[in-house]
Image (cartoon, rainbow, N blue to C red):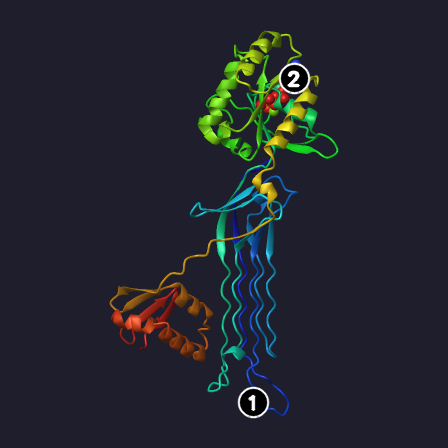
Amino acid sequence: MFVDEAQIEVRAGDGGDGAAHFRREKYVPRGGPDGGHGGDGGDVVLVADASLHTLLDFEYKSTFTAESGQRGAGKNRDGKTGADCIVAVPPGTIVYQAETGEQIADLVVPGDRLIAARGGQGGRGNTAFATATHRTPYFAEQGLPGERVRLRLELRLIADVGVIGFPNAGKSTLISRISAAQPKVASYPFTTLQPQLGVVRVDEERQFVIADMPGLIEGAHEGVGLGDRFLRHIRRTRLLLHMVDLAAVDQRDPISDYEALNGELAAYDEELASRPQVVALNKIDLPDSEVFLPLCQEYFAERETPVYAISAATGQGLHELVGAITTQLEELGPRATDQREPQTFEMPQLEEQPLRIFRAGEDVFLVQGTEVERILQRTNLDSEEALLRLHMALNETGVIQALSRAGAEAGDTVFIGDVELEYQP
Ligand SMILES: Nc1nc2c(ncn2[C@@H]2O[C@H](COP(=O)(O)OP(=O)(O)OP(=O)(O)O)[C@@H](O)[C@H]2O)c(=O)[nH]1
Ligand SMILES: [Mg+2]
């Protein structure tokens, strides 16, 4: 099955807590602090992997969690860093933030990476808090939680050539002839239900990737037939192979088909309509084609559009067609993205929220702000000493003063994040 959309949740590892610990040595009555630091949590990293071609795996597994950092320990032993969680995605995966819809990265080149969720920092052990005046800190810092985010993945296949045409034009037949791919071929429309890639080996050195597409019909851009569901997959091609059926039934004629399809492309995306095209007039082995062949050749000659008469069924004309496509691709040159080295992308940094105080009741205040909330996450609320230090930190960062200006009085309730505290100036 081919899946080209998925929603996943990525959870980075939490930072390990720092240790509050003191040296215990024989004959040393009161050893100094020796609590190690907590390890940082692991990141969740998306990596474009050339062996994948669909987002199918995410139907079965959609949550990815990195390892948390370990706690620090005595004897200055730092906790181990949590292992990263590597999530392989097919090249061509575009990553969006699910909530905002913002595009974050386009993982096109195999090896492209996105640090999707950063692990939380480990907390410092009590060694970090010993000073000349305060030699025995009994508290340590807590690790910060890892980031969590929901992502939407959208795959756009990467192929050199996209094959377009009405249903039954012979697109899959052609692909089964010129590449190793074996798409289903049948005499009814809409045989191909999803795009499929095939590699065409031209000679020892040269090859190109061709994408078989479901047939398009008039109104596709408005969702008729399989509609434009798959059109985005040809956006990344460099060249379109437009297959025209010379022996179509239902009173269709090849030239109107050709024009109608180009109209659909333009309605979907102007840029796609201006993509270079090679036209193949298919089914010349059938007697019915004799009527239209000369008309078509004249029509395309007038427009100086390269056109090739072929029979995908018998193989007639395919050598010339493949040769022409190869030459065109060489003239067009590689995509800009194929030229670049794999890259590492990062999630946009969340904006630091400034300190804000809200009065939530007669004697209840809410405090918000990135810095102050982080200070709280770092504080072990079970330690009186840590609370004392918290009070100092709230003083230094101006939170106490701001509360006082907002009218807080001793004994009032203050919420910072989801932690409830009592206001003491
Ligand atoms: N006689 C003849 N029949 C052909 C030729 N090419 C394809 N066909 C037949 O046309 C029918 C449709 O071929 P497909 O390759 O499945 O067509 P398609 O364009 O992939 O169709 P969809 O996947 O439905 O869009 C099949 O019965 C093929 O055998 C040809 O060159 N000559
Ligand atoms: Mg097909």
Marker count (numbered): 2
Label 2, on which residue?
310
Q: Where 90 falls versus 199 (above or below)?
A: below
The answer for how far apart the CA atoms under marks 1 and 2 are is 92 Å
Secondary element at image label 1: loop
Q: Quadrant of the C terminus?
A: bottom left
- Measuring from the top left, give residue 350's x and y in whole percent: 43, 57
Q: Is residue 193 visible?
A: no
| For marks 1 and 2 on the same chain, the one whose residue lies earlier in the sequence | 1
Q: Is residue 158 visible?
A: yes
Q: Amino acid at mark 1?
A: Arg
Q: Residue furthest right?
A: 204
Q: Quadrant of ligand 2?
A: top right
Which of pointers 1 and 2 indicates the residue nearer the eye?
2
Q: Quadrant of residue 207?
A: top right
Mark 2 Cβ and ligand 1 under 8 Å apart: yes
Secondary element at image label 2: loop
- Measuring from the top left, give residue 110's x and y in whole percent: 62, 45
The numbered dot on residue 30 is 1
- Measuring from the top left, give residue 270's x and y in whole percent: 46, 29
Residue at 55% of width from left, 34% of height from top?
233
Q: Quadrant of residue 328?
A: top right
Q: Amino acid at mark 2?
A: Ile
Neighbor class of circle 1 (other Cα within 10 Å; few <14, some 14-19, many 20+) is few
Residue at 61% of width from left, 79% of height from top?
75
